[in-house]
Every structure is written in structure tokens, then in C-alpha cells.
Amino acid sequence: MVSTSGDVLAGPSIVSGFREDLLPMADIVTPNVKEASALLGMQVATVADMHSAAKLLHNLGPRNVLVKGGDLHDSSDAIDIFFDGKDFYELRSSRVKTRNTHGTGCSLASCIAAELAKGSPMLSAVKVAKRFIETALDYSKDLVIGNGPQGPFDHLLRLKNTSCRQEAFNPSDLFLYAVTDSGMNKKWGRSITDAVKSAIEGGATIIQLREKDADTGEFLEAAQACLKICRPHGVPLLVNDRIDIALACDANGVHVGQSDMPARVARTLLGPEKIIGVSCKTPQHAQQAWIDGADYIGCGGVYPTNTKANNLTVGLDGLKTVCLSSKLPVVAIGGIGISNASDVMRLGVPNLKGIAVVSALFDRECVTTETKKLHAVLTEAQ
Ligand SMILES: Cc1ncc(COP(=O)(O)OP(=O)(O)O)c(N)n1
Ligand SMILES: Cc1nc(C(=O)O)sc1CCOP(=O)(O)O
């Protein structure tokens, strides 16, 4: 109806046709703020207005409403409001600076339709579509096409030679998740790089640097050195808590806890492609992590652990409850080792993709041997 560039694409008679005939038939309507204003005859200029507009539009008949806030420039991130007639969701993505925004609205709607055709629920479809658009805008940043104020954004990102871009997150990478601990490595007289090298040699499928007592310079240097080890093996490297370190060394992503940088802020800072994991102990945590744009959740403590002080143990039952409620893949953590890893993997929930371990790998003399043993146990239990 009204393009992001402000062009009016439909006159008043068409607008009333939309309102009276089309909206009552729609499963979802996805107006930008200018379109919401035109449909409702009110000014939609703030996030609060977007909430009101979503509700008013829903009253006109569509089952779901997504009011897109890409044009609201008073926010550092792009905020869309989704309303399903019951709950409101504030969906955020990073605001990509590019002149190539032409076609984003049509592509978002098409992407939602494609996800629905694949069987996704509406909110999942919207989230996937938003992430696609955000990534495509990011890919479009350097394109110079045409002479107008705007250029087309890049729909063809999946067909590009992406050698300089990060691989998409693969949940099966959570299979054997090695989380480092500087204290343990010091105790056994090994450097962090040696620890990471050995874990990868033993079959670790993803690494997290959890260096609680390293200062910033030391942590950054270690992360850069570890990335040089991980990259040639295709093993993703995540940084615990420290978004700044992850950005500075271009790590594959971060893992954040409930009291760290909120995942939605991390997503805004890191962009659409970095991996974000969130620690979750309850179904509510898991739901929020999904809304915030996380890629996976870590759930624990499955068993008591000495590695993290005062950690609440949720047990196998707590893990199962969180897995069943989570729309994201899950990795189990806390007190897991060779003796109990198969009990965890045999829980029988499809989105439980693996185990994350600290002491079972790093509080041991030979990291490679322990990683190999644990890998064998997991493979057997699959
Ligand atoms: C895979 C994974 N799951 C959970 C955690 C715990 O993270 P957090 O709650 O931030 O606690 P600390 O690790 O910071 O002590 C994790 N690190 N990794
Ligand atoms: C870092 C961490 N997070 C946990 C959580 O429950 O979120 S448990 C934990 C420590 C895991 O260490 P280990 O494998 O040595 O028990």
C-alpha cells in the first residue's frame, strides 16, 4: 500500500477494499507503520502506537497482525509488533544501515507464506522471515545498483559464494560441547589453546571459552588464538558472556546466562548470523530465549556440579520439561560425564541435541582421551 520509500501504491478505494474485504480473510497482515496509519486513519509513530494499531487491525478480522517498525528511526534496532489476538510479541532485529531496502516488505510476506507452507506455526514463520530479511539486508550493504535513492536488497544470498561469511548454525554441532575453564587448565599445566586443540582432536563439536578470571586483553588474545585452531576444523567457537570479545575476534557467537546481556540485545549487537545460546532452567526462560532470537538453549544443572557455585540442579525431569517446551535445540549441562551421559541422551526428546561439559574433559590429565571416550558414549546412546 505504502512503500518504505513513502510511495503510495494504493488509493482510498483500494484501502477500503483492503479493510472490508481482504483483512477479514487474512491469516496475517503485515503493514509497515505508514500502511497501518493509512488503514486505521491514525498516526502510528511510536512503539506504543504500534501496539494499539496491531490491536485495532486485529479487530478488522485478520487472525494475526505484524506491524513493522523498520521506519521508526528513533530506535537503534528494528522493532516489529506481532499480535495473535491474545498475546503481543516485540520482535527485534538489528537495524542494518543500507540504501538497498527495496522489496523487503514483499519478501518478508513471501517468506512467511513459504514457512507456513512448510508447516511452521505463525509466530515461528514470522521469526524465520525476519531473520532472512535481516541477513539479506546485511548482504546488500555493499551493493551499488541503479541511480535512485534506494536499491534492491539481496534475495539471492543463499546462492552466493559465502566463503567469507559464517556458516549457518547447525544444531547437530551441540553434540559434544566443550566448555573451557581456565582454573582447570592451569591446574593441569596446559594452555587454553592446547586444551581446545586436544578437545577438537578428541571429537568436540563446538567450543565455548568460559574464562572467568582472564583479563580482557588476555581473553581476547586467547580467543583469537583458539579461533585459528577451530576454523580449519569447522568447529564453531563461542565466547561465554563477553559480547565485546566475540565481536573483537569475530567468534562464531556467544553464550549468555539469565543475568548477562539479554539475548535480544546480544542479537542486535551481533547481527543475524552469529550464534547465540542462552542458559535456561524453566519453560519461561526457553520461550523468552526463542522470542529474543537465540539459536539454542543450554539447560541445567542436570546433575550437581562443583564447577559452577550455587547452581540450581533441575535434574533429568527438569531438563525434559524444558526440552518439551522449547522451540529451540537444547544442550544439557551440569555434572555430566562418562558415567551418566547416556542417561541424558536417552531422554527421548528430539530437540535435545547433545551435552555440554567442563570438568569431565578439562579437569582430567588427557583431554583428548576423555573427549574421545565421551564421544563414543554419546554415539552409542544416539
Ligand atoms: C552450554 C552452556 N549452558 C549453560 C551455561 C551457563 O551459563 P551462565 O548461566 O551464563 O553461567 P556461567 O557460565 O557464566 O557461569 C554455559 N556456560 N554454557
Ligand atoms: C557452566 C555451567 N552452567 C550450568 C547450568 O546449569 O547452567 S552447570 C555449569 C557447569 C558445568 O560444569 P561441569 O560439566 O564440570 O559440571
Image: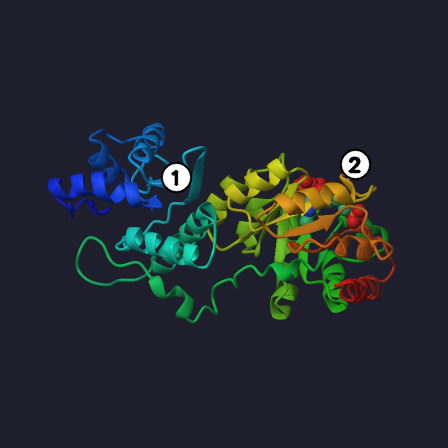
Dot 1 falls on a residue whose secondary structure is strand
Instruction: Give the mark nearer the N terminus: 2 vs 1.
Output: 1
Residue labelled with disc 2: 309
126 and 136: which is toward the camera? 126
Q: Position of residue 225 (x, y in %)?
A: 64, 60
Q: Position of residue 189 (x, y in %)?
A: 84, 56
45 and 266: which is toward the camera? 45
What's the CA distance linking mark 2 and mark 1?
Answer: 37 Å
Mark 2 vs mark 1: give the one in front.
1
Mark 1 Cα shell of 10 Å, populated few (<14), some (14-19), many (≥20): many
Residue labelled with disc 1: 79
Dot 2 falls on a residue whose secondary structure is loop
Q: Amino acid at mark 1?
A: Ile
Q: Position of residue 16 (x, y in %)?
A: 17, 39
Asked whether the residues under the numbered discs 2 and 1 touch, taking CB atoms below 8 Å apart as contact, a structural biologist would say no
317 and 374: which is toward the camera? 317
Q: Which mark is residue 279?
A: none
